[in-house]
Image (spheres, rainbow, N blue to C red):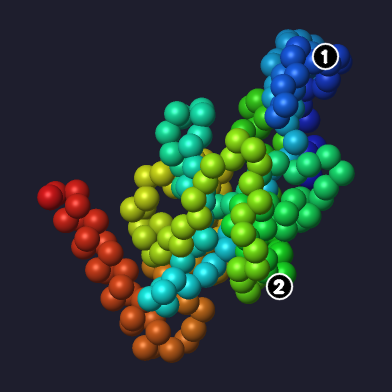
Amino acid sequence: MEDERHTHLHWHETSRRILTSTPVFDLVEVERQSADGRSGRYALVDSPDWIHVICEVANEEGESCFLMVRQFRHGTADLALEFPGGIVDRGESPEEAAWRELREETGYRPDRMRRIGWTNPNPAIMMNSVHTFLAEHPRKVDSQALDPNEILDVEMVPIRTVLARRHPHVHIHAVMIVGLYWYLLERGYVREEGMRAPGTVRSDSPEDHGKVLRDWSKTKKGDERDKHG
């Protein structure tokens, strides 16, 4: 029904050509015509799909953490703190790529890999999808197996501090924000009745919820001190 109401918004492709090819994407020019007869040429980025893997682990203090990687990104010429991930290779499924990338970048392997969301990174110019996976019951089984020009550190980053926006190198990366969104939905932080406090566990125990909210309150107060200090 929705598509029938919006048919006047659709553009139909009449031609396509590759302007240039690179190791990670093709720059494509497509010509499209609107329902009322207008036409135009548009430059699009045709890239393989991407994946990233959200992996929950505990640090030495027993605190729940994301397993993340810190590396230099050439687009910003700066560091980024990311969920492990990469490109889906030719002949791979997104899930196969998730297993491979997590093992290569961190040496971890889960009991199960489950896709919790996907989206297009920018529908205006991108033609691919990014898939978010959740690694269940991960454990360290091997050392890293990085590509020749891949230099990255593996870090255990407390979940509560990521959700409290205390890591700017996470939040400069839009794809990581997308992953966090799917994670919040999956873990029940976002529900019809509104937002839970980050760090909330799925439990009906008043003790559990009281501890989480106290920890969250301390984090918020620390943020305010940082802003005004």
In this rendering, the answer to whether 218 lies above or below 42 is: below
Q: Quadrant of the N terminus?
A: top right
What residue do we see at 71% from left, 73% from top? 111
Q: Position of residue 72 (x, y in %)?
A: 48, 37
Quadrant location of residue 4?
A: top right
First along the sequence among labels 2 and 1: 1
Residue 176 shows in this picture: yes
Left or right, residue 193 beside residue 61: right
Crowding near the residue tagged with mark 1, few <14, some 14–19, many ≥20 C-alpha atoms within 10 Å: few
Tell me if mark 2 has few (under 14), some (14-19) or many (20+) residues whose alpha carbon lies within 10 angstroms of its own: few
The reply to whether callout 2 and callout 1 are in contact (CB within 8 Å) is no
* Amino acid on which the number 2 mark rests in the picture: Asp
Query: Where does residue 164 sit, x and y in percent of width and height?
Result: 35, 58
Where is 15 relative to 106, above or below? Answer: above
Q: Residue at 64% across / 27% down in the picture?
A: 124
Q: Which mark is residue 17?
A: 1
Q: Mark 2 = which residue? A: 111
Question: Number of labelled discs?
Answer: 2
> In the rendered structure, which amino acid carries the disc numbered 1?
Arg
Position of residue 54 relative to residue 88, above or below, is below
